[in-house]
Image (tube, rainbow, N blue to C red):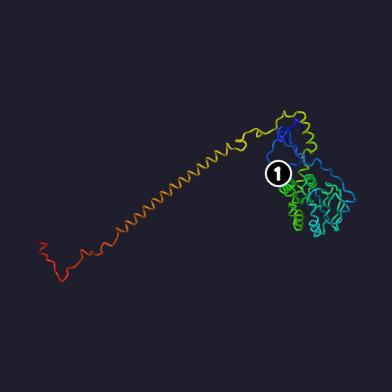
Amino acid sequence: MVGDRYIPMKNAVGRSSFLVVNTDELMDFPRPLTSQWVYIGGIDAEKRSSLSPFWNTILSMRSRSVLVSFGDISPCRRRNDILLQAFSEIPDTTFIWHREENVSFNQSNVVVVQKFPGRGLLADPRVSTIITDGRVNSLHDVLSGGKPVVCIPSDQTQIRNCHQLGKRGVAAVTDCRDLTPRSVKEMIKQTATTEMRDSAKILSEAVTSKQTSPEERLIRTVEFAAKYGSSVDLHSNDDNVGIVQRYHLDVFVPLALLLATVVLLVAWIARSVWDKCKKNWSQKNNEGKSGAHANEDPEKPNKSSSAEPKGGETVDDSKETE
């Protein structure tokens, strides 16, 4: 709302009955969420249709085909030289490149098209993978088609989308700025492995096997919110807690004090034991030195007592008897 009735986005989200998210829960990163979150990923994806003779002719040109699709403003579209060089080194593959403008490349295994049936092509077994920049709509088509992805993102949102699929084991990811012919070839080779193809197929089956479609889920959510509004409170209590509870200071501070007390106690005990051992060691050293002086040779002659009479003088024993 604008004017006097303007509501800041943070407050509007806090007062909302539901949060509708344009992604799929099987593609998103696992995290704790409240019941407010409603996933409607793939709601705008086109329906699967049979391929025309034109597309059957293109897919029959070689043993396998790769779909290439980037956004209109993606910087990866300006890396034509790198992509074409990589494509030229894979002559047994037809690369179907989706571009809005009418251009052509002098390369026999590259076919430029302005429109293509996304889900119909990805469902065909002759298409082995798709090269994309990680736009959420193209990734939803990939999920339904069950094909591995070569993901070349160019912004933070696309990076997050690509790594979501990379975590599921169905995408090979590299940044658009790090793109080289060798990296493109390696990623295409990686998506051709049995492990990645099986992971993509399992994820596709899980997405299509959900009980409710995105359209039905959105309709039911909007009808429920219009009927009951905020009377059904699905908000978390964490919205109104203080700083102590929000950052769990009531738990971490006592634990930190307890840990500090234990460390100081152990340090004091260790210091006491060390001082006692040091004192005993000093006493033993002092006792050892005293014993060494006391144990000197007692038979060593004494100069005063062992002096013999000079000049042949004899001692008169009679004086002693007297």
- Residue with the most extreme bottom position: 311
Residue at 38 percent across and 53 percent down: it is: 282
As rendered, which of 109 and 125 lies closer to the eye?
109
As rendered, which of 306 and 67 lies closer to the eye?
306
Q: Does 238 sit left or right of 172 as displayed?
A: left
Residue at 54 percent across and 41 percent down: it is: 256
Q: Does 304 sit left or right of 54 as displayed?
A: left
Does 109 appear above or below 210?
A: below
Please state the total of marks drawn on the protein image. Answer: 1
What is the quadrant of the N terminus in the image? top right
Image coordinates of residue 165 in percent, x first then y, are 74, 47
Q: Secondary structure at mark 1?
A: loop
Does 193 appear above or below 228?
A: below
- Residue with the most extreme front position: 3
Image coordinates of residue 277 in percent, x first then y, are 41, 50
What is the quadrant of the C terminus in the image? bottom left
- Residue with the most extreme right position: 53
As rendered, which of 298 and 241 lies closer to the eye?
241
Is residue 197 visible to the viewer in this orientation of the structure? no
Residue at 82 percent across and 43 percent down: it is: 45
Quarter of the image where one finds residue 218: top right
Image coordinates of residue 149 in percent, x first then y, are 77, 50
Image coordinates of residue 111 in percent, x first then y, are 86, 54
Q: Amino acid at mark 1?
A: Phe
Q: Does 276 sit left or right of 135 as displayed?
A: left
Is residue 256 visible to the viewer in this orientation of the structure? yes
Quarter of the image where one finds residue 89: bottom right
Q: Does 100 sit left or right of 18 as displayed?
A: right
Q: Residues within 10 Å of mark 1 (few under 14, many from 20)?
A: some
Task: Name the residue beneath numbered marker 1.
Answer: 29
